[in-house]
Amino acid sequence: MSGHSKFANIKHKKEKNDAAKGKIFTKIGKELAVAVKEGGSADPANNSRLRDVIAKAKANNMPNDTIDRNIKKADGDANAASYEYITYEGYGPNGTAIIVEALTDNRNRTATNVKNAFTKGKGNVGTPGCVSFMFDKKGQIVIDKEEYECDADELMMTALDAGAEDFSEEEDSYEILTDPDDFSAVRQTLEEAGIPMAAAEVTMIPQTYVELTDEKDIASIQKTLDMLDDDDDVQNVYHNWDE
């Protein structure tokens, strides 16, 4: 299962400047608020969705007091903005597939911004389902070898016994894949075992990758991805460009 690990990208994101870190925290803060509202509880013990978002926050080095503050704010503010999830699908240069997950309180604003990002990158937004069939929805847990020196076989058995589908060893990390429905249970088992996670989230993994060789195509898709990354409404972007 080598070749699709996002660990290099995860590590790169973590090393970004404080401004970028603040943006990531803002996006996770919105996810925490939605998890509290939709899960009906500000207590992670009674809200599995909230537990998963908290794990994602910790994997991104969000301080505990910041996490707690976001949860309390969401729980105590009945007039807080109401966010909804919207997914966009489309194409970048040379048929590359892109999926955008947004969390917004203004559908029109988000749709306009996402469409603009695709257009500027010489791509276009397609109809729902036009590219999602090229991806597999999986729970993905990444463990940094620098943070956890362990026996690979032992880690693999712990993950598989907890319900994981697959385990692979990369050069600098271990990757565990689960069915989305089993993700929470597997992640919680690893957390209780004291295993630090560099990433823990349900994600979309491409079945195949597209290689771009033309410099203009590479610049175009990078333009789209950068604009989407800068958009406060955009939570996640998945693509099958082989970077």
Image (cartoon, rainbow, N blue to C red):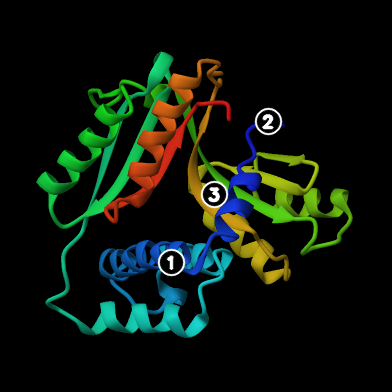
Question: What residue does disc 3 label?
Answer: 182
In the image, what residue type sits under mark 3?
Asp
Question: What residue does disc 2 label?
Answer: 3
Q: Secondary structure at mark 2?
A: loop
Image position, residue 184 (x, y; %): 53, 57
Dot 1 or dot 2: first in sequence order is 2
Image position, residue 80 (x, y; %): 17, 74
Where is the N terminus found, in terms of image quarters?
top right
Dot 2 or dot 3: first in sequence order is 2
Nearer to us of marks 1 and 2 is 1
Image position, residue 133 (x, y; %): 41, 22
Which mark is on residue 19? 1
Label 3 CA crowd tier, 10 Å (few <14, some 14–19, many 20+): some
Please tell me in which quadrant of the rendered image residue 98 appears. top left
Looking at the image, is 46 positioned above or below residue 27? below
Image position, residue 115 (x, y; %): 21, 33
- Camera-nearest residue between 173 and 211: 211
In the image, what residue type sits under mark 1?
Ala
- Camera-nearest residue between 24 and 212: 212
Query: How far separated are the C-alphas under marks 1 and 2?
Result: 30 Å
Q: Secondary structure at mark 1?
A: helix
Dot 1 or dot 3: first in sequence order is 1
Query: How far separated are the C-alphas under marks 1 and 3?
Result: 34 Å
Contact, mark 2 vs mark 3 (Cβ under 8 Å): no
Q: Is residue 72 left or right of residue 152?
A: left
Which mark is on residue 164? none
Q: Which residue occupies 55% across, 16% down?
A: 213
Where is the C terminus found, in terms of image quarters?
top right
